[in-house]
Amino acid sequence: MKIRKIIIGLIAVTLFSGCDDLFEPALENYRDKDAMYDEANYALGILLNGYTRIPVNGWSFSDVATDDAVSNDRDNGYRKLATGSWTSNSNAVDQWTNGLAAIQYMNMMLEESDKVKWSEDENLRRMFNDRTKGEAYALRGLFMYYLLQAHAGRTADGTLVGVPIWEKSLDTNSAFNLPRATFEECMQQLYTDLAKAEELLPLDFEDISSDAQIPEKYAGINKEEYNRVFGAYSRLRITARIAKGVRAQAALMAASPAYEDDSNTTTWEKAAGYAADVLDLIGGINGIDDNGWTWYCNFTEIDGLKEGGNPKEILWRGGISDNRDLETDNYPPSQGGRGRINPTQNLVDAFPMENGYPIGRTEGGYNSNKPYEKRDSRLKKYIVVDGTTVGPNTDEVINTFGFSMYDAINQSDYATRTGYYLRKLLREDVNLDALTANTQRHYKPYIRYTEIYLAFAEAANEAWGPKDSRRGYSAYDVIKKIRERAGICRGTADPYLDECAADPVKMRELIRNERRLELCFEGFRFWDLRRWKVDMNKLNETARGLNQLDGSFVDLEVENRIYKEHMYYGPIPYNEVLKWDALEQNVGW
């Protein structure tokens, strides 16, 4: 039966987006907005729309649109994007509708939360209201970050712009035909929202053990009441700590070369400081998790997670589920998989030797006839190379280069195109055999601490140089620690790192390469190349592979990239520009 009314604000967002499927279920199934005032669970449903729309809830594998990977799936949206089909009405990285819809929900929550009967008890009502508004501010800031990442750019006159800023929910009387705010105005809105979130939210949702731990602003409330709202039961929701992490992510983007502008006040120094603010909460350089680089296959740790707890490596994550989806998509065909994500030779070449030198340096000892010997241990941990095993059947060698009936290059629609298969992210205790198939626990990290360490290293090197330790540790310290935990020069000098540390430009390239390796296949490379505004030749670097014929290795050109100068920035959706004449498109689109 249809409900008598729909929420006016939802109509407005639909008008603004022009998207029939913006809201699910269909709009006629929405209840009157007034229903939220007496039904706290209904009100929370509006807030939870923000969580369900977080783009990193699932794996995007936008790496397929970079020099790190290709896909054997002809319908892969990122493959199409990279090979000439990226347009303003065909955009695999679009966040416009999703992001603005999320902000609409958060605006509604902020406007209506004071009216909701969160509890009959006034103390609980006040705390629930604070928590809800804190989450809404944080999520609004988070979605501003995703919108800027996907849609900020420059208009025809060179102005650096973001998106329209909506601080109130939209209704039928709202002014929709608004110009885009400047990038700086959007960043300031983001910073303001995150600061408000930090004022309202606890650092973490954890139970306290005594009334003495209750914040002063909640004086008179007992620990049982406090824990009911801000305790461990609410883990995985956004917190003040997570808001700090989002600020660090956004500032790193804003400080980058693609956003250099006289009006932009986010400097490398600020970006380094925001990252350090997060890291100092876990002990600075001493907080690096020795097992953080293998977070996805630390099986005992994953299987032992309870009650929303986080491993040491993880700042924020999604929920846990038992499945075999990643393995089904990415195991080689001999293991029952579809082999969808194929790492490139470009990425393989980026892994240094075990002594830390790049493969192009004679000091490294690279042997082109034995290309995987004495290499950085992350290579074989993240990528299935020739002569290694994958999956539970450890007696079966996957020969990606030879004459395997299943796994050789282009042998089938599920075979690799590059000579490599994905290993990172997969649980190799998953069996896809029809008779013994099983599932295992997986989770998706939203923010890893390694990401924040690398953000600090990048920003600190740009702001102060490689070895400046004004925050108690330096870019050099972070990179040395990250390389050591992967087995590079552990406990000894790292000559190549020391060489790079004498020159901030060389250090920049090393930091960028470490970021490439540590965060590969986690959705960073596509955005990193653009915020760095790398040379167009790099953006269009041909994706390469490696075959083995008659005992010799043969380089392969697998897939050309087709990017144009304006594609450092993504477009505004074509339909939006048609509808609103005040909404100016990024140049080139």
Image (cartoon, grey):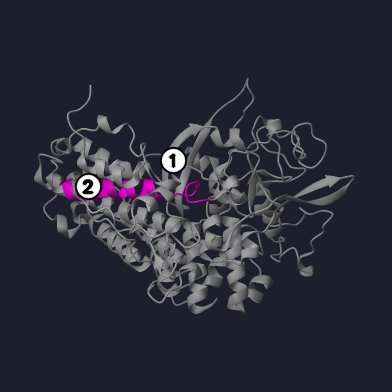
Against 499, is 40 above or below?
A: above
Q: Position of residue 425 (x, y in %)?
A: 57, 44
| Residue nearest the observer in this picture, 384 or 476 | 384
Tell me the residue at 60%/73% (across/down).
Answer: 507
Quarter holding the N terminus is top left
Q: Is residue 413 magenta?
A: no
Q: Going by the image, does 351 lie left or right of 129?
A: right
Q: Could you tell me which secondary element the residue under label 1 belongs to?
A: loop
Inspect this view and state whether residue 556 appears: yes
Q: Is residue 92 magenta?
A: yes
Q: Which x, y percent locates residue 253? A: 45, 64
What amino acid is labelled 1 in the image? Answer: Leu
Per the model, the C-alpha gap separating discs 1 and 2 is 34 Å
In the image, the segment drawn in magenta is 87-113
Looking at this view, is 15 or 513 the one in front?
15
So how many labels did they put on this image?
A: 2
| Residue lying at the far right of the rendered structure | 550
- The residue that label 1 is drawn on is 305
Q: Position of residue 228 (x, y in %)?
A: 22, 42
Q: Which mark is residue 579?
A: none
Kind of residue indicated by mark 2: Met
**In the rendered view, would you say 314 is above or below 321?**
below
Q: Mark 1, residues whose alpha carbon is within 10 Å: few (<14), some, or many (≥20)? A: few
Relative to residue 466, is residue 404 drawn left or right? right
Residue pictured at 36% horizontal, 53% vertical: 143
Residue 467 picture quarter: bottom right
- Say the numbered circle drawn on residue 108: 2
Q: As displayed, is residue 280 above or below residue 119?
A: below
Q: Earlier in the sequence, mark 1 or mark 2?
A: 2
